[in-house]
Amino acid sequence: MYKIGQFSKLTGISISTLRMWDKKGILKPEFKTPRGERKYSEAQLQQVLQKKSDAPRINVGYVRVSLKKQEDDLKRQMDLLELFLVKQGKSFKIISDIGSGIDYSKPGLKELLKLISSNQVDTIYVLYKDRLVSFGFELIEEFAKLHNTKIEVINQTEDEIDEEELVEDILNIIHVFSCRLNGKKSHINRKIAEKLLNEKA
């Protein structure tokens, strides 16, 4: 049996949606505990996953720029991807982000990963590899393969990275590592202080 939170994670369906489905009789839990906790069976899990796998999968065009003032470039990327996908005769959805290529908490990227994990994406289209992420493209590609999702890079040549964008990524990397180092230093300093206090005692 699965609690509602576990069932939500495994199916990719939000807890609020599951509660609504229960009230409307769309998908009632196998049973409820005396405290009203919903419990779902393995059969229900497989039924939902089967329905989701039978649903038509979408194509996603992903575009990104690092800085707010690059919105013209973001629009250019969107126009190019839309033109490409229309010519291919594919139905699609465009997801866009403004943020560093090493920031993995961007809302668009999180939405994309959620769609992949719930087996809703057939192919992801990006103009250049680094538009998806600056580092770790292969890791996301492997994750996508686990869900039978392909990533197609339309332009295989290296994108000319804006100097300011590159500086922004480097500064973000430095910030991450400096925070980690400072964290380690404070931990070491705390241990030294504790040792000195113990020796005085």
Image: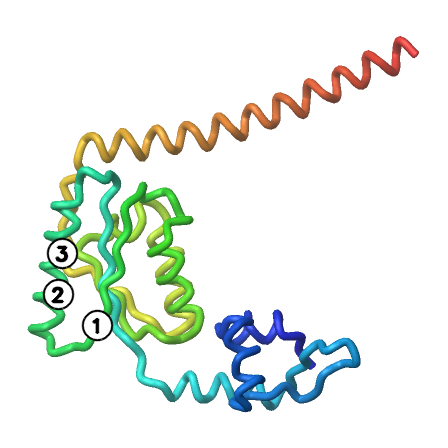
Can you name the residue that lies furthest to the front here?
Answer: 23
Percent coordinates x, y for residue 57 in the rendering = 31, 79
Can you name the residue that lies furthest to the right here?
Answer: 201
Apparent side of residue 42 relative to residue 97 in the rendered image (left or right): right
Identify the element where label 2 is drawn: helix
Residue at 42% in and 49% down: 105
* Disc 2: CA contacts within 10 A as few (<14), some (14-19) or many (>=20): some
Question: Dot 1 corresponds to which residue?
Answer: 92
Nearer the N terminus, badge 2 or badge 1?
A: 2
Kind of residue at badge 3: Asn
Q: Which image quarter is the C terminus in?
A: top right
Percent coordinates x, y for residue 197 in the rendering = 84, 13
Question: Dot 3 corresponds to which residue?
Answer: 155
Identify the element where label 1 is drawn: strand
Identify the element where label 3 is drawn: loop
Residue at 33% in and 73% down: 121
The answer to which of 125 and 135 lies nearer the viewer is 125
Kind of residue at badge 1: Phe
> Do the residues under discs 2 and 1 have CB atoms within 8 angstroms?
yes
Q: CA distance from mark 2 to mark 1?
A: 8 Å
Kind of residue at badge 2: Glu
Percent coordinates x, y for residue 98 in the rendering = 27, 46
Q: Which image quarter is the N terminus in?
A: bottom right
Question: Dot 2 corresponds to which residue?
Answer: 82
Q: Quadrant of residue 114 in the image?
A: bottom left
> Do the residues under discs 2 and 3 have CB atoms within 8 angstroms?
no
Q: CA distance from mark 2 to mark 3?
A: 15 Å
Q: Is residue 49 above or below residue 60?
A: below
Q: CA distance from mark 1 to mark 3?
A: 19 Å
Nearer the N terminus, badge 2 or badge 3?
A: 2
1 vs 3, front mark:
1
